[in-house]
Amino acid sequence: MDLWEIVWMVAFGFGTLGFAFIATNVIVKGFAEARSLLHELGGEEEKQEGQP
Amino acid sequence: MRFSTFDWTLVAVYVLLAFAIGMLARKRITNIADYLVAGRHIRYNLGVASLVATELGLVTMMYFAEQGYRFGFAAFIIGVIWAAAYFMIGQTGFVVERIRQLEIITITEYFQVRYSRGVRVLAASLLTIAGVLSLGVFLKLGAVFIVNFTDIPETSLHLTMTILVVIVVIYTILGGMVSVVLTDYVQFVFLAIGMLMASVFVLHYHGIISIFEKARELYGAGAMNPFTHPEYGWTFIAYWAVFAVSGCVLWQPVAQRILASENPELNRRIFKSTSVMFLGRAFFPILWGIGAALYFGAAGDPTAGMPKFLAEILPIGILGFLAAGMFAALMSTDDSYLIAWSGIIVQDLIAPLRTKEISGTGRVMLTRICVFVIGFLMLIFGIWYELKDSAFRYLLDVTTIYYAGGLPVLVAGLYWKRASLPGAYLAFAFGAFLPLAFVAEDIILQARGISEPGFFNELFSANMRGLMSFVLGFIGMGIGSIITGNSPALAGKQS
């Protein structure tokens, strides 16, 4: 097994774990932010409509 | 092929969900800032999901898999450098922090603030050329994946491309950036889970350790070292490093997310997290490509190999989930790119050239018309144009048309007081020359039915051509600025 084989194995392991960790966080917390985005844009729209 | 009715149902559910979100978002759009940068309300998790989903297109997976199929694990260097560029920008705030503070909608808008309207229009023209030329390939590779992954006959490739374009154009026109960001989130969920599952199945099929051993046998013992690999080497690494930095700060779909975030500090966090995601973005499809090469042999089709291989080894249900994820990948990238380039055309080409101010509603309408026109152009170009080299190489060349001048103009504008208007023009002209000449020559030769490589193809190697373009761009900025100096007007703008 040469050096580059080990380098790519380690890099792949790190990349996979990092990907899985951040993806899980983003999936769990992103839903609330998506709802909030729609709410904020809707709120601005209502505010504009309500202005004299 | 084993693509079942259940798998198709999963895909259909996803498409309907995307349409529903497009319709929902449409009601919330009140102005051009809502349409193009989602009213600047994007927070951290949604920002990461959107950035990753945009840059994780089906085309990305296809060209990475193609690199993996052809060159093995050495192709991992592409992902490592790209991730390093994102991390460096996240760590230092290089460009992104200053640019977000300016409250602009497009990066090219900055060129007008710092230099002149002419520079903005020139940059927008080069960016539009680069964007539209790349979009045609996006569509084609997407269709190649779907045809080879499902049981659609290969003769229906063009029909598949047409249907894809119609779906993406309709829901982009409907919802603008709000729908793009929201569907990006849904797409991120499908993509992240689908990619991890597919990689597990590929590793299970070939063996975690044995896939490295088998690759060594197939590609040769020295093929893992990117520094000595004939396809990559030092020139590629230098070119790709500077290209990756440009991709972070100049590429409109990425820049649009920088400009859409709630505040400048948030951008740095988003970039750091995204850098880790981008390791997986490159590693997983490269791994699938290597798996396909080991399955079909080196003589197989490097482009169609990956989807064919996955269709062979994945079980029913996972096939549908991944297909929905891939379909999501195609839509998330194509819709973002359509809206990014339509925004550029309206904000940076049409609006600056008109003497009369265009209303917010007028701009939204014009942007929607541009989405339709670009969608039509990408379909025509995608059907007609045949790639000579790999898709990755083609996309590098067309994007360098804008990046090679854009990077020195942007960086010097933000960090060098002497950066001048002639320097900006020279940087764009010098930087765009080689890749533009190469791509134009290639298209002309194909239109004439000539298959031999042209003059610019043989002048430099592909890596050297790209690297030289950036060097020329910086030389142009340096010469123009040092000779002419900074005008009082520009100095005032800078302060």
Image: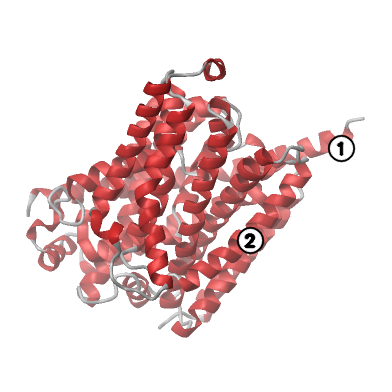
| Distance between the alpha carbons at the discs numbered 2 and 1 | 33 Å
In this view, the residue in front, A45 or B341, is B341
Picture residue at 18% right of the left edge, 63% below the top = B211
**Residue B282 place in picture, x, y as percent:** 33, 53
Q: Pointer 2: residues within 10 angstroms few (<14), some, or many (20+)?
A: some
Figure quadrant of the C terminus of chain B: top right
Have a look at marks 2 and 1 and say if they share a chain: no
Residue A50 percent across, percent down from the top left: 88, 34
Q: Secondary structure at mark 1?
A: helix
Instruction: Look at the picture and state if B49 lies above or below B117.
Output: below
Q: Is A33 positioned to the left or the right of B381 in the image?
A: right
Please state if B399 lies on the left or on the right of A45 as rendered: left
Task: Tell me: B483 left or right of B291.
Answer: right
Q: Specify the subunit that label 2 lies on.
A: B
Q: Residue at x 64, y 41 (%)?
A: B347
Instruction: Please tell me whether residue B313 is drawn above or below residue B328 in the rendered image.
Output: below
Q: Which mark is residue A49?
A: 1
Q: Which numbered tag is attached to residue B373?
A: 2
Outermost residue to the right? A52
Instruction: Give the residue drawn at x 49%, y 25%.
Output: B98
Name the outermost residue toward the front: B483
B381 and B424: which one is in front? B424
**B68, above or below B242, in the image:** below
